[in-house]
Image (cartoon, helix red, strand yellow):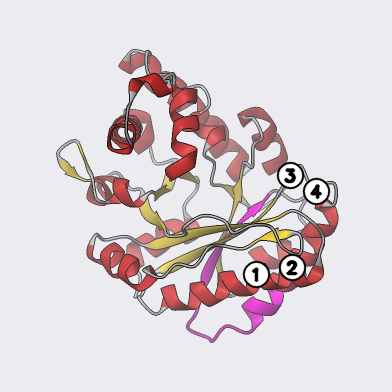
Amino acid sequence: MPNPEMMEKIENGAGFIAALDQSGGSTPKALAGYGIGEDAFSNDDEMFGLIHQMRSRIITAPSFGNGKVVGAILFEKTMNGEADGKPVPTLLWERGVVPFLKVDKGLADEENGVQLMKPIPDLDDQCQKAVAKGMFGTKMRSVINKANVAGIAANVAQQFEFGKQILGHGLVPMIEPEVNIKSDERADCDQILLGELLKQLDALSDDQRVMLKLSIPVEANLYAPLINHPKVIRLVALSGGYSTDDACEQLAKNSGMIASFSRGLLQDLRHGQSDEEFDSVLGGAIDQICQASIA
């Protein structure tokens, strides 16, 4: 059973969820945005060491514990690491931030206009380790590129299949079938996705509840039926490549939807900033994203 205090924080907290789960191929891009080029590391261990230093700097910054960040999504290596001399999940919860674990293994090739998740053969093992570390939930991402009904139905069905497996471990799954914001069929994708999500939610048993992480819809408040659904703990928005300003502007149009941003949170942070400058920039982004989330 999920931690009831964490559940209260996620379900009713006034704030947003930080996405700090870059892994594998996305890590060099995240480091480059932070001002660390690929010439700074020669292997994966060094690369992940540098991204852990960046994440540790973020989660130990004064502004990150100001109550406006209610949750954080972590890569497995971050979950297993330490910051400020403590296990990262422990430190986060001490600061009032609920920890989630990214569990997917990346995307399969596109078929029927969507990219399903690759198989997750170690999902049970990941969940057991997450429970032992004091994690609240998980997150897994797939992608929708075209308004293909069969493809979107398969995408959502896969998410909920894994989600039920995760629920069996007492964790809350954050289901993320991302609609590509560059798709020329985006509005139609949103509509089809809404219908498929409602079908899967209605089929859950009374004791099963999930979170949803979705692209901000073209039509403002399209996802109100999801926000109000009894099986949905919280609906959060991904920034999907939007700048902070654009993501916040779009999010603020959608009542009840809160942010779970990565790029929108981190875009102006730099390795060379002093601790004071770093916290000032981070705090400004946190304030802006929080305001859009509670607007």
Q: How crowded is the residue under tag 2: few (<14 C-alpha within 10 Å), some, or many (20+)?
A: many
What residue range appears in magenta?
Answer: 198-215
Q: Foreground residue, 171 or 62?
A: 171
Pinpoint residue 187: horizontal percent, then vertical percent.
83, 53
The residue tagged 3 is 181
Give the structural element (helix, strand or loop) at label 2.
helix
**Mark 1 or mark 4: which is in front?**
1
Kind of residue indicated by mark 4 = Val
Q: Return the residue at label 2.
A: 151
Amino acid type indicated by mark 3: Ile
In the image: residue 112, left or right of residue 238: right
Q: CA distance from mark 1 to mark 3?
A: 18 Å
CA gap, disc 2 to disc 4? 20 Å
Residue 229 seen in the figure: no
User: Which of the two labelled residues, at mark 2 and mark 4, occupies the earlier sequence position?
Assistant: 2
Give the labeled residue for mark 4: 218
Residues at badges 1 and 3 in contact (C-beta under 8 Å)? no
Label 1 is placed on what type of residue?
Answer: Val
Q: For this view, does 170 lie left or right of residue 264?
A: left
Q: Nearer the viewer, residue 139 or 144?
A: 144
Name the N-terminal-most of marks 3 and 2: 2
The CA distance from mark 1 to mark 4 is: 19 Å
Reading the image, the residue beneath label 1 is 156
Dividing the picture into quadrants, the one containing residue 22 is top left
